[in-house]
Structures are given as structure tokens and as C-alpha cells.
Image (spheres, helix red, strand yellow):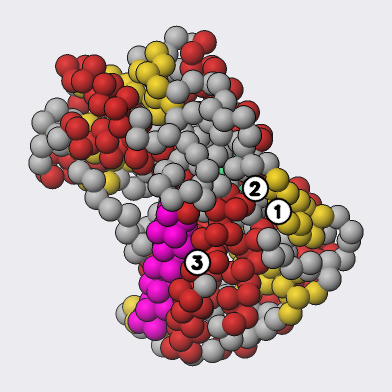
Amino acid sequence: MKAHDGMYIGGEWRPAAGPDRIEVVNPADERVIAGVPAGTAEDVDAAVRAARAAFPGWAATPPAERAALIGALRDVLVARKGEIAETVTAELGSPLGFAEAVHVGAPIAVASSYAELAASYTFEERLGNSTVFLEPVGVVGAITPWNYPLHQVVAKVAPALAAGCTVVLKPAEDTPLTAQLFAEAVHEAGIPAGVFNLVTGTGPVAGQALAEHEGVDLVSFTGSTAVGRKIGAIAGAAVKRVALELGGKSANVILPGADLAKAVAAGVGHVMNNTGQSCNALTRMLVHRDQYEEAVALAAAAVAKYPSGDPREPGTRLGPVVNAGQRDRVRGYIAKGVEEGARLVAGGPDAPHERGYFVAPTVFADVTPDMTIAQEEIFGPVLAILSYEDEDDALRIANGTVYGLGGAVWAADTETAVAFARRMDTGQVDINGGRFNVLAPFGGYKQSGVGRELGPHGLGEYLQTKSLQF
Ligand code: NAD
């Protein structure tokens, strides 16, 4: 696959400071498809300097002009949709149809929303005898994971640019090629030099250097809770702003009276999409004990529609997980589920194919809330079905993890579902199959994170206030 042998800094591709490289592997066949430079603190420093230099000009650019350039960026993403989807499939293993519809479709929708928001947002307000100005925070250090290689980037860069901030991006090691395509799109859209910069590299070297750099005013991180804690500590010590979008263990609560078949099928689909590698995946299904066995049978039937296969083949709905480490980790969790006494209804720890980082789509029944597979984020195609006695019991189980990112409630009517959702300790809840909304704030309660992404709330993360009294 096509790859740049350099970093995108100050509007051009520059050679990396050091000799280290990262190999990009296709998880479907384990072949090396490209290599990119592994950046050092020196590359990060050059990128932060470029972003600093570009900041005053970009912050002073009228919002309508920033909006037009974000719109131009969206148009380039639309024009290069096919190429981006193929790249996501090659480096992440996402089935091509899902890559086109979601991996590219969602960021295009997000970029569109910020093209509109940049133009319409009120960057000043009157409060009594004061005028409050909402000003850009400065230089943003964005650190992204591999699970949605383009969406995670656009969910940070588009609002940062709309706010008037400049950005240095350090994308995940596994998916740097999509990030390079994004940098090309920024260039093609005519966004001024230095406003967006890209440094590929490893987390502990380039990522850490970016989080620690004193020229970075805000670190926006998405990834594991373990690394999020470290980044939070670095930001805390330097008193710089930080946004953390971390893991989840979201509950799909099916209340008596809901359309059980629809709720179970949608719940299984939500976990199997992206091979279970979504931070808000509804990995715990909660069913009333009277309907439990019926739900388990429905889930077994639903998961049979997700056989894993070559993500490039049309019709494949489940690809591999991203790398060998994730495959081993997920299969380890499945073995742990069996060991702790959960009942395997589908799948299991064995490899479904000889080559590629595949995990069998797996459903567990008889899962109790204290089991490891009911508490920890697995990040693979693994669903745990739990039973509850009554609504209070369901709520206790739903809220009984350290996480609080997503969730879903199914009930006979909207009011019942909303009443339950209001008692859940989580940042987002889909009511009776409610669809993902790019304008709704996305982020976590509890250890799922700090701050919100997307829509006007996401834009607010990149702004700081200045009040003038008259
Ligand atoms: P990770 O947290 O290690 O990596 C995320 C990003 O942080 C990558 O760009 C990485 O290079 C960078 N990073 C790693 N160490 C760093 C450091 N010390 N300083 C600065 N940056 C650093 O996540 P991962 O290894 O890719 O995945 C591990 C687990 O994280 C997954 O199994 C899953 O549970 C979770 N995860 C969550 C999300 C999410 O959207 N919430 C996304 C991906 C992974």
C-alpha cells in the first residue's frame, strides 16, 4: 500500500528525525503492507513548533472562513471515500461495506457538522455588564486509537479547527496509513500550513513526547484507561487541559414488554460490528429471568449471521481483530469466561481460521455480574448475557462496573425506557434502538473519561472563556 516516508509538518512531508520504522500489517492475512517512520521527540517538537507558529493566524481567521475550509476538507474525504475505505480495511481488517458506511461515512458526517457549527456558533455572549468571548485554547495534541482510524481523528481535528486551534496528531501504531490519507486531504483542502500536523510513531515515544510537550495546551486522548490515567497525570502536573475518551462496558437493558427479538438482534449486531472493537459496544445484555432462555436462543441465532471471513469479500460481516496481541487478549478473556463458569452458547477460544487475527463470534450465557467477562472491557466479538430479577436489580447490574460510556434500553414504551435511562450512570443511552447522532455529546461517566466529543459540546472542549466587564 501507498505510504509516505515522512511526517506532515508545516504543510509539507518532511523526513523523520530518526531511523526507526513501524510496520503496518494486514490483520486478515498477517502480511506487512507498508512501513511508516516512527517519530521521536525531535519530530514532535518540530510539529508543535509549526502548530504554534500557525496558531495566531488561524485563531484570527474569521469563523466563516474556517467553516469553508472544514467544508472543503469534507469534500475531499467524500471524493476519496473508496480509497480511504480500502485503506481502513487493509490496516484494521474492517469488512469493506462497514468501512465505507461507517469508517468513512461517520467522519464525513462529523466534518459536515463542524463546517456548519463553525459558521453558526456564537463565539461571544453578553452576561449582565460583561461580554464573554470564547477563544481557542491553543495547540492541541491529539492521540488516537486504531479502532475507528478516521473517525477518531476527525472527532478531534474538526472541532479543534472549528474553534480556531491548531493540531498535532499522533495516530495509533496499527493504523497510520488512514492518518496519512487524512493529512493529504487536509493539504488538498487548502488548510493553511501548520494548522494540522501529523507525527506517526509509538505511544511511549512520540505519544508521550506530545503529551509532555510544553507547547501543547490541550491533550485530547482516546484509548485505554491505563494510558488515559498516565496522560491525565502528565496534564495534571503541567496544569494543561486534557480530554480523555476511555473504555466502556455498556449495558443493553431489555425490559419486560420490549420487542425481544428486535432488541436481541440489534444488541448482537452492535457487538459484532467492527468486530467488537467499539468503545461503546453493548457487550452486556441484561434480560429479565422469565425471558432469559428465549433471549439466549435468539442471540445464538442472531450471531450465526456473523461468520468471520475475508473483509475484502463482499458480504463478509465480521473481520479479524486488529493485531495478534488483541487476538490473544480476547481469546484469553473467552477462556476466562469458560473457567469462571459461564455457558458458551456460540464461538469459543479456538481460532476459526488458520491465518489472520480472527476470533470466533462468541456469546456467553449464565454470566454473573462479578465475572471478569462482565466487568472488564474485552474489545472483541464477545457478548455476555446476564439475567435480572426486577428493574432495581437490572439497574444495579447496569451501573455495577467502573465504566459509563454507552448503553441502551428497550421497553414497551418510550416513557418507561427513558425513566430507566435517567437512572443509568452513563454518558449515552439509545432508547428502543435510537440511532447514533453526530451532534450528541459523546463521552463517559466514571472511568470512561473526562470531557465530551462531537457536536456543540465537543466544540466547547476546544474553547476557553475571557470576560470583559463594562
Ligand atoms: P492504547 O491506549 O495503548 O493506545 C491508544 C493511543 O495512545 C495510541 O495512539 C497509542 O500509541 C497511544 N499511547 C500508548 N501509550 C502511550 C503513552 N505512554 N503516552 C502517550 N500515548 C500513548 O490502546 P491500545 O493498546 O491501542 O488498545 C488497548 C485497549 O484499549 C483495547 O483493548 C481497548 O480496551 C482500549 N481501547 C479503547 C478505545 C476507545 O475508543 N475507548 C480505543 C482503542 C482501544
Q: Is residue 278 above or below residue 177?
A: above
Q: Are marks 2 and 3 in contact (CB under 8 Å)?
A: no
Q: Closer to the camera, 342 or 446?
A: 342
The residue at which mark 3 appears reads as: 82
Q: Can you give x and y, in whole percent of width and height, for residue 193 in the image?
A: 67, 83
Q: Which residues are magenta?
A: 97-124
Alpha-carbon span between mark 1 and mark 2: 6 Å
Q: Please report the residue visible at 14 percent of the width from the left and 28 percent of the height from the top.
A: 256
Q: Can you tell which quarter of the image residue 20 is in?
A: bottom right
* Between discs 2 and 3, the one toward the N terminus: 2
Q: Can you tell which quarter of the image residue 149 is in?
A: bottom right
At mark 2, the secondary structure is: strand
Q: Ligand 1, what quadrant?
A: top right
At mark 3, the secondary structure is: helix
Residue 40 in view (yes/no): yes
Q: Can you give x and y, in whole percent of width and height, for residue 113 in the image?
A: 38, 72
The residue at which mark 1 appears reads as: 33
Q: Please report the residue visible at 41 percent of the width from the left and 63 percent of the height from the top.
A: 105
Q: Are marks 1 and 2 in contact (CB under 8 Å)?
A: yes
Q: Closer to the camera, 466 or 36?
A: 36
* Residue type at numbered disc 3: Gly
* Between discs 1 and 2, the one toward the N terminus: 2
The residue at which mark 2 appears reads as: 26
Prevailing SS of the magenta stretch: helix
Q: Please report the residue visible at 52 percent of the width from the left and 50 percent of the height from the top.
A: 312
Quarter the C terminus occupies? bottom left
Q: Are marks 1 and 3 in contact (CB under 8 Å)?
A: no
Quarter the N terminus occupies? bottom right
Alpha-carbon span between mark 1 and mark 3: 18 Å
Q: Is residue 135 above or below residue 288?
A: below
Crowdedness of circle 3 by 10 Å Cα count: few (<14), some, many (20+)? some
